[in-house]
């Protein structure tokens, strides 16, 4: 009889069709003997089904009214799987977070429920009962949850998106908690005495370049032009994988003298490899993430009795030191890779004010006459 057309198979002398729908492979028996005429009929049926699936108008019950899928409807789990398969363009760390949110919020609770039966109140109750630790964690989880139901809506599987009413909570980014120049030098001095020189180089460069920690661990010698003092920041490393920077834009960073000195010292350790600038001194391999240097950071702050803050504060320290030295906020914004200068002005307004040190008030006094007339 020859090969059967795509989507048609013979099982125990009877025809069965198969096709993809709602993120899974569906197989449905036709109960017809495997004759040439019936095989042609099955092939036309599969083509019709695939066309309707592609255009989002396929009704399972219309074609297979006795199927369990037609009786229960497309499950939530079917669409969570499909949605996640379509997120390959995102960073691995983002996809991992999406999978965690979908599993705990949707699949574990209502994964086997027909997706068209899910109500806004159902999702709202699940979200409130989940007990997210922070508003930010809740907001992050809502992104893939909305996406699952939006995909089902666009496919015509549901008529109303029950997740559309799930609103994100207002959150406030924590204020920068930078170190003073004195604290910076004390930490570097302690690391010089207590830790490997490469760790000292890493943190001195971090303090005086303003790179994000994920950008620091992915920086390569090929990104550095030591003659002109420029670093091309074009990737970040998260969970061992390189991805684009946070703003998805490469930027050129003018390196300060202290950053360049740290690079000069680091050359002796990793420059021959022409690979990653900063490597784990224990393994002599590139950092998978920023955890190893972060542990050294925590040890230094504890030993010195300096108030604890995250190692990411090296970036905020660079920004605030620059602004208090009188650097142009536009230049600082470019160095940091902020998407807008407004972000820099909003986040570091206190330190911009400190840089003024009364100069603006003095200008006004000079313009208006500095002497008080008295009574």
Image: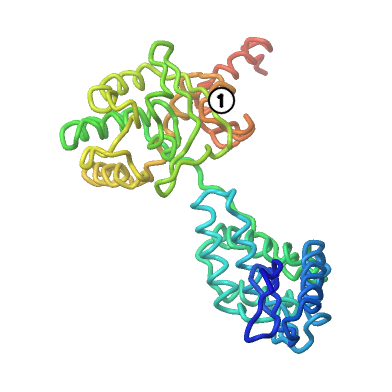
Left or right of 38 on screen, residue 203: left
Q: Residue 41 in the image: state x and y as whole percent.
A: 81, 75
Q: Is residue 343 above or below residue 269?
A: below
Task: Please tell me in which quadrant of the rendered image residue 297 appears.
Answer: top left
Of residues 233 and 62, the one drawn nearer to the viewer in this rendering? 62
Q: Is residue 243 above or below residue 167?
A: above
Of residues 31 and 223, the one drawn nearer to the viewer in this rendering? 31
Q: Is residue 76 above or below residue 146?
A: below
Residue that badge 1 annotates: 334
Q: Residue 84 in the image: state x and y as whole percent.
A: 60, 61
Of residues 344 and 257, the one drawn nearer to the viewer in this rendering? 257
Q: Quadrant of the N terminus?
A: bottom right
Left or right of 159 on screen, residue 23: left
User: Within 10 Å of the Cα at label 1, are there few (<14), some (14-19), or many (20+) other Cα atoms?
Assistant: some
Label 1: which secondary element: helix
Q: Residue 329 in the image: state x and y as whole percent.
A: 57, 24
């Amino acid at each position: 009889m020859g090969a059967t057309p795509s989507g048609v198979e013979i099982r125990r002398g009877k025809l069965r069709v198969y096709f993809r729908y709602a993120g899974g492979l569906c197989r449905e028996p036709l109960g017809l003997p495997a004759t040439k005429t019936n095989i042609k009929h099955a092939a036309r049926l599969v083509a019709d089904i695939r066309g309707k699936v592609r255009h989002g108008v396929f009704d399972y019950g219309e074609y297979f009214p006795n199927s369990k899928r037609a009786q229960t409807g497309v499950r939530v789990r079917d669409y969570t799987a499909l949605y996640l398969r379509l997120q390959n363009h995102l960073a691995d760390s983002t996809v991992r977070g999406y999978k965690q949110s979908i599993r705990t919020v949707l699949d574990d609770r209502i994964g086997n429920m027909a997706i068209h039966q899910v109500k806004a109140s159902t999702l709202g109750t699940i979200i409130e009962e989940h007990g997210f630790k922070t508003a930010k964690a809740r907001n992050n989880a809502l992104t893939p949850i909305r996406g699952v139901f939006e995909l089902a809506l666009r496919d015509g599987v549901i008529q109303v998106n029950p997740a559309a009413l799930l609103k994100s909570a207002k959150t406030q980014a924590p204020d920068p908690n930078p170190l003073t120049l004195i604290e910076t030098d004390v930490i570097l001095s302690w690391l010089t005495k207590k830790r490997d020189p490469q760790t000292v180089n890493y943190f001195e460069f971090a303090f005086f370049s303003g790179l994000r920690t994920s950008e620091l661990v992915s920086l390569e010698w090929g990104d550095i032009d030591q003659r002109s003092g420029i670093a091309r920041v074009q990737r970040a490393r998260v969970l061992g994988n390189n991805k684009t920077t946070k703003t998805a834009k490469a930027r050129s960073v003018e390196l300060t003298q202290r950053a360049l000195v740290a690079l000069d010292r680091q050359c002796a350790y990793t420059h021959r490899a022409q690979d990653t600038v900063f490597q784990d001194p224990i393994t002599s391999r590139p950092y998978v993430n920023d955890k190893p240097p972060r542990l050294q950071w925590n040890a230094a702050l504890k030993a010195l009795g300096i108030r604890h803050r995250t190692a990411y504060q090296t970036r905020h320290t660079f920004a605030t030191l620059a602004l208090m030295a009188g650097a142009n906020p536009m230049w600082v914004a470019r160095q940091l890779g902020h998407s807008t200068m407004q972000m820099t002005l909003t986040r570091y307004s206190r330190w911009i004010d400190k840089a003024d040190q009364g100069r603006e008030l003095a200008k006004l006094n000079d313009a208006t006459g500095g002497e008080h007339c008295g009574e």
